[in-house]
Amino acid sequence: MNIKSSAFQENQTIPTKHTYYGVEGGKNISLPFSWNDVPSETKSFALSIVDPHPVAKNWVHWFVIDIPATITGIAEGASPRSMPNGSRELLNTYGSLGYGGPEPPKGSGKHPYVVTLYALGVPSLGLSEMTTLTEFTKALRGNVIATTSITGTYDR
């Protein structure tokens, strides 16, 4: 299974239009992703974007769950209005539903934004919108068939 973004390459800078509003030029436009080579037994997908930088402490930028197995990507700017049918966006660490782009503190160095796609053996994770990263990780246990990831960076 593979994931890619038309907005950035592996370990390259995420364009400013995809950053959060506090970044000069940030428009918080959700990133585009596409994936392929999915295991045939996949019943749904989940997607996460997490910043593991020591300053960010696993800041959740996006949780999407219950993405139907027939879906092969998420369009640029899909959050929050034009997500794939059946998928659900959860709260990010900013406290809002859906995508929350990068906004690393000035002077904190380059932050990695790890995008992970999970192929799941269940049609739904049954999580609430208020799910934490710990709860998300727990819900994945025993349900993941395959994972793939791509990492973008941002520094200011």
Image: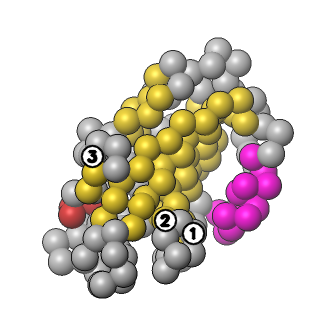
Which residue is farthest right? Answer: 142
The residue nearer to you, when weighing 57 against 143, is: 57
Q: Position of residue 17 (x, y in %)?
A: 21, 61
Q: Which residue is mark 3?
A: 8
Report if residue 52 is visible in the image: yes
Q: Which residues are magenta?
A: 129-140
Query: Could you tell which of marks 1 and 3 lies nearer the N-terminus?
Result: 3
Query: Could you tell which of marks 2 and 3 lies nearer the N-terminus?
Result: 3
> Which of the 4 image quarters holds residue 91?
bottom right
- Label 2 element class: strand
Residue at (48% x, 54% y) in the render? 114
In the image: residue 29, left or right of residue 135? left
Measure the C-alpha gap from mark 2 to mark 1: 5 Å
Measure the C-alpha gap from mark 1 to mark 3: 21 Å
- Label 3 element class: loop
Q: Is residue 32 above or below residue 127?
A: above
Badge 2 amino acid? Asp
In the image: residue 126, left or right of residue 102? right
Magenta stretch: dominant SS?
helix
Q: Which residue is mark 1?
A: 58
Q: Is residue 17 magenta?
A: no
Disc 2 + disc 1, Cβ < 8 Å: yes
Q: Which residue is mark 2?
A: 51
Badge 3 amino acid? Phe
Q: Is residue 133 magenta?
A: yes
Q: Position of residue 2 (x, y in %)?
A: 47, 28
